């Protein structure tokens, strides 16, 4: 059921909260007073697939950019077939494709390439993730694209970058998770390296790409010149892995695989309550570590000389874990959380998706929203990434059908109905 506040307009869903799952939208009379979305007026051509490039375009679209998703006329974006479906409708696409107009163009056909150049002339950003050399082979080199539009920001997202010995290799985020050192750090000490069961490196690269695009757009505002963004998926994830490279350089140190433990602090682990709920505890600061040990009845450990730093505590993780598990294992989860909260000690339940959608903090933040969809009706998905107090982001529509906006977009680019019909006959669009 749609709440009364959400009912007037079900096509725009912003970070303004109105109920547990829906977010409020101004009525038609109030729309004139709504501040312009921060990226309104920015046009983005998303010609990328699986997953970093398209997700970067989604982030831009969430804050007002006019994103035009370009797909092959016969072979849609592979993400439309990725993951679970309902009644033949892909579910992940509804989020990944939101706020995008969808068009079909065969970029490998010279006629299709010419159509893209028509769109480029009025675009600010183009995001692609073909193997290096592919655009050039189609007559769509950066030089030709920027001749059509000198202000164009061209974001090229690949596994390994545009040059170097691996640049021509096929690659996905899983290879970046392996090569970056992430997999080597993940898993139990006596187990194998572990890859995440979702697109972690792709997601990190998507955030980095959106950031890079914004930096390049700011530069173009200053001097009128676009540029090429060379985003290698193997690189952004490295920054999130901390100071390992410097530690190797200066100390010859290789961080070991420690399971849920940290080499930088303890106790830090997941612990099972009496009623079978897993709870995560972190003690990244000294004061929190002291509070945790007081809560679990082992305040005497705070006086140990080794307790004075996170690294030293990590060397005594067995003793600290035993103390925390012993106390948590003797109490139900609700009681554990209540006692930790009263003591200002850091704790959180380990959720699967069911816990996420039911959690009152996520509900308060409006993190999950329900959006009207042409195929599925009312669907839940993640909201935009953050809240802006004056110009909030919004979900204007969910992922649209393959080629739904082709005619509209091509007409906007100046093509006549007769030209569009000829291109369709040729299967260039």
Image (cartoon, grey):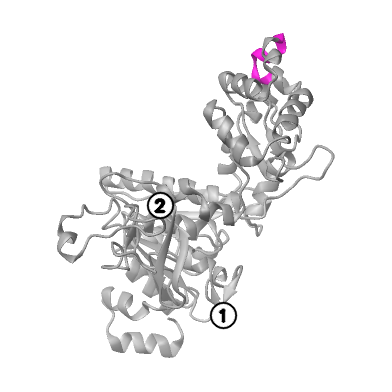
Q: Quadrant of residue 60?
A: bottom left
Q: Is residue 254 visible?
A: no
The local secondary structure at tag 2 comes to loop
Q: Position of residue 193 (x, y in %)?
A: 77, 45
Q: Nearer the viewer, residue 12 or 161?
A: 12
Q: Quadrant of residue 277?
A: top right
Look at the image and give the residue range highlighted in magenta.
304-311
Q: Residue at x 37, y 74 (%)?
A: 115
Q: Is residue 91 visible?
A: yes
Q: Residue at x 59, y 35 (%)?
A: 347
Magenta residue check for 195: no
Residue matched to label 1: 88
Q: Residues within 10 Å of mark 1 (few under 14, many from 20)?
A: few
Q: Which quarter shows the C terminus?
A: bottom left
Mark whose residue sits in front, 1 or 2: 2
Q: Is residue 89 above or below residue 16?
A: below
């Amino acid at each position: 059921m749609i709440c009364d506040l959400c009912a007037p307009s079900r096509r725009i869903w912003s970070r303004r909260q109105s109920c547990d799952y829906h977010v409020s939208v101004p009525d038609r009379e109030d729309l004139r007073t709504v501040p312009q979305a921060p990226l309104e007026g920015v046009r983005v051509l998303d010609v990328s697939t699986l997953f970093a490039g398209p997700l970067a375009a989604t982030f831009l679209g969430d804050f007002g950019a006019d994103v035009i998703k370009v797909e092959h006329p016969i072979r849609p974006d592979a993400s439309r077939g990725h993951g679970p479906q309902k009644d033949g409708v892909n579910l992940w696409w509804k989020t990944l494709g939101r706020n995008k107009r969808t068009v079909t163009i065969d970029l490998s056909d010279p006629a299709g390439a010419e159509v893209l150049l028509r769109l480029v002339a009025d675009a600010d950003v183009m995001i692609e993730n073909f193997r290096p050399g592919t655009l050039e082979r189609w007559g769509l080199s950066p030089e030709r694209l920027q001749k059509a539009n000198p202000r164009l920001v061209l974001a090229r997202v690949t596994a390994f970058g545009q040059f170097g010995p691996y640049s021509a290799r096929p690659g996905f985020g899983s290879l970046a998770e392996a090569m970056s050192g992430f997999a080597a750090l993940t898993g139990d000490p006596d187990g194998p390296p572990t890859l995440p069961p979702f697109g972690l490196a792709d997601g990190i690269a998507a955030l980095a790409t959106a950031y890079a695009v914004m930096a390049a757009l700011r530069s173009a505002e200053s001097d009128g010149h676009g540029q090429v963004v060379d985003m290698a998926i193997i690189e952004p994830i490295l920054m999130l892995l901390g100071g390992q490279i410097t530690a190797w350089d200066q100390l010859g140190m290789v961080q070991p695989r420690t399971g849920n433990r940290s080499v930088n602090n303890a106790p830090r682990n997941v612990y099972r309550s009496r009623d079978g709920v897993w709870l995560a505890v972190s003690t990244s600061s000294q004061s929190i570590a002291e509070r945790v040990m007081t809560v679990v009845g082992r305040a005497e450990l705070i006086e140990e000389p080794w307790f004075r730093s996170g690294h030293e505590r990590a060397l005594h993780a067995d003793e600290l874990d035993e103390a925390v598990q012993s106390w948590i294992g003797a109490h139900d989860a609700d009681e554990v959380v209540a006692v930790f909260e009263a003591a200002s000690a850091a704790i959180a339940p380990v959720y699967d998706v069911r816990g996420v959608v039911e959690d009152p903090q996520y509900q308060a933040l409006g993190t999950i929203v329900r959006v009207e969809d042409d195929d599925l009706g009312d669907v839940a998905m993640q909201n935009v990434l953050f809240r802006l107090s004056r110009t909030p982001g919004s979900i204007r529509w969910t992922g649209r059908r393959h080629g739904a906006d082709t005619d509209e977009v091509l007409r906007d680019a100046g093509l006549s109905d007769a030209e569009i019909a000829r291109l369709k006959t040729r299967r260039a669009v």
